Image (cartoon, rainbow, N blue to C red):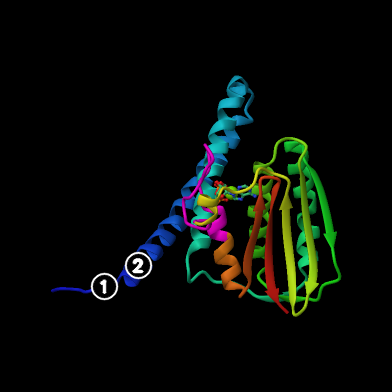
Amino acid sequence: LEIEMSRLDILNVVGEMAASIGHEVRNPLTTVRGYLQFFQNKKETIQYHEQFQIMIDELDRANLIISEFLSLAKNKAVKFNLCNLNAIINKLSPLIHSDALHFGHNVQIEMGNIPDINLDEKELRQLLLNLMRNAFEAMKTGGTLTIQSYVDGDNVVLTVRDTGTGIPQKILDKLGTPFLTTKENGVGLGMAVCYRIADRHGAKIDVKTSPQGTTFLVTFKI
Ligand code: ADP
Ligand code: MG
């Protein structure tokens, strides 16, 4: 029996397999993480506290990679609701500020008067976090992250700007390709996920970059 498959069929099958394996692998990881945390907090193992933390952090990293991989799946279920981008920014604000503190960066949030639009809140949160992480990682200590929301014609625009070192042309041309990274510990899925999320929202992502910094503009139709 010969079965013919197009390249797209193969990609879809591989994608679906990867997605289901991802879901299955997550459960054992969660169990192991729970036990590690349990043993970490025993007084008998106090001298190994740091080693336990390394194991937990590595599991979190594996989990993050699986999450990003799962959100790359084309047929991922999304839940659209009429909501305000500013509410999502507000909810993330404490996390953004604590990350900024950790890196020694400044944060400026400028929210305009914008209407509600159809969004998957979880996905938008992910998009914003991915852009924010890249921004923080692109700057030396003392940089500034600026997040803005505003109306431009028939669009709601979200911008994430950093005062980092910019994106080299040869990376810019391939931005969003899975596993593209210039970082020693990078995975290279963050931007691919952002483009996928924007795509599912009918939004577009534009990039302006120079050696003085980078701005990502995400444009949604009202
Ligand atoms: P990762 O962060 O794991 O490397 P991403 O997909 O998030 O993967 O980003 C891919 C690459 O794009 C990064 O390694 C970096 O070279 C470049 N990049 C993305 N955002 C920025 C930014 N704000 N400033 C400079 N370079 C960036
Ligand atoms: Mg990243």
Give the residues in magenta. 174-193
| The C terminus sits in image quarter | bottom right
Packing grade of label 2 (10 A; few <14, some 14-19, many >=20) is: few
Packing grade of label 1 (10 A; few <14, some 14-19, many >=20) is: few
Q: Amino acid at mark 1?
A: Met
Q: Is mark 1 within 8 Å of ligand 1?
A: no
User: Does 83 appear above or below 67?
Assistant: below
**Nearer the observer, 200 or 204:** 204
176 magenta-colored: yes
Residue 182 tag number? none
Q: Position of residue 46 (x, y in %)?
A: 63, 22
Q: Which residue is mark 1?
A: 5
Q: Report the Cα–Cα distance between label 2 and label 1.
A: 10 Å
Q: Which residue is mark 2?
A: 13
Which quarter of the figure has residue 22? bottom left
Tell me the SS state at disc 2. helix
Q: Position of residue 191 (x, y in %)?
A: 56, 56
Q: Amino acid at mark 2?
A: Val
Q: Is mark 2 within 8 Å of ligand 1?
A: no
**Nearer the observer, 37 or 93:** 93
Tell me the SS state at disc 1. loop
